[in-house]
């Protein structure tokens, strides 16, 4: 279920709140290949299923940065910000990739609003703790702290 915040006061009230989980998303070879083309990262572990079958993971895996990029659409399932003039992705504090995502695997996003603070220009800055979980795996694919700014 998507949480909705309307305006800065409601965004501030989210501090400490668990946002739940997104739906599961299957990682397809086509998605991995498209990402490889977009980033010019054509390492065999990502795009060559035959060679990767003999590699350390028994098949192709998603790029770490592909997994990270999925924060954007999956986060949209967790939180809907309304009643602000502008929202921006301010960056990331810490990102780790504890476990690879095998092609054919499914991932989902778990999110928590760690803190919200005022920033100059009539805005707030949200620190969000994200975990990209892999279906059937005890270890996550990605753990990151993202920072977003919202302005009234």
Image: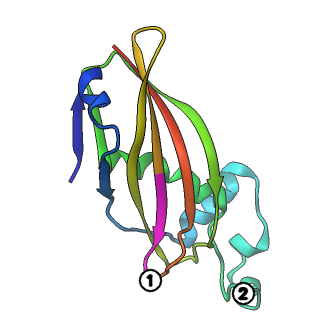
Residue 148 visible from this viewpoint: yes
What residue is drawn where x is 29% and y is 21%? 8
Q: What stretch is highlighted in magenta?
A: 130-136
- Looking at the rendering, which quadrant does residue 101 occupy? bottom right
Q: Is residue 92 left or right of residue 114?
A: right
CA gap, disc 1 and disc 2: 24 Å
Is 9 or 43 nearer to us in this picture?
9
**Residue matched to label 2:** 50
What residue is drawn where x is 50% and y is 69%? 27
Is 92 or 71 nearer to us in this picture?
92
Q: Tell me, yes or no, whether the highlighted magenta stretch contains residue 131.
A: yes
Q: In this view, does 95 lie above or below 32?
A: above
Q: Tell me, yes or no, whether the highlighted magenta stretch contains residue 62.
A: no
Q: Which mark lies nearer to you, 1 or 2? A: 1
Q: Could you say where residue 49 lies in the image, as x and y percent from the top left?
A: 68, 82
Q: Could you say where residue 139 lies in the image, as x and y percent from the top left?
A: 54, 75
Q: Main secondary structure of the magenta part?
A: strand
**Residue matched to label 1:** 136
- Is the N terminus in the top left, top right, bottom left or bottom right quadrant? bottom left
- Looking at the rendering, which quadrant does residue 23 occupy? bottom left
What residue is drawn where x is 63% and y is 73%? 100
- Is the C terminus in the top left, top right, bottom left or bottom right quadrant? top left
Q: In this view, does 38 lie above or below 138?
A: above
Kind of element beneath mark 1: loop
Kind of element beneath mark 2: helix
């Amino acid at each position: 279920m998507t949480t909705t915040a309307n305006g800065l006061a409601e965004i501030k009230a989210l501090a400490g709140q668990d946002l739940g989980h997104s739906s599961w998303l299957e990682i397809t070879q086509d998605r991995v290949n498209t990402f490889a083309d977009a980033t010019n990262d054509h390492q065999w572990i990502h795009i060559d299923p035959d060679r990767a079958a003999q590699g350390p993971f028994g098949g192709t895996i998603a790029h770490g940065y592909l997994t990270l990029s999925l924060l954007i659409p999956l986060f949209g399932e967790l939180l809907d910000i309304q009643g602000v003039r502008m929202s921006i992705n301010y960056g990331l504090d810490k990102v780790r990739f504890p476990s690879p995502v095998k092609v054919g695997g499914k991932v989902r996003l778990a999110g928590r609003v760690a803190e919200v603070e005022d920033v100059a220009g009539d805005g707030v800055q949200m620190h969000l703790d994200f975990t990209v979980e892999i279906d059937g795996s005890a270890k996550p694919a990605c753990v990151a702290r993202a920072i977003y700014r919202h302005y009234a």
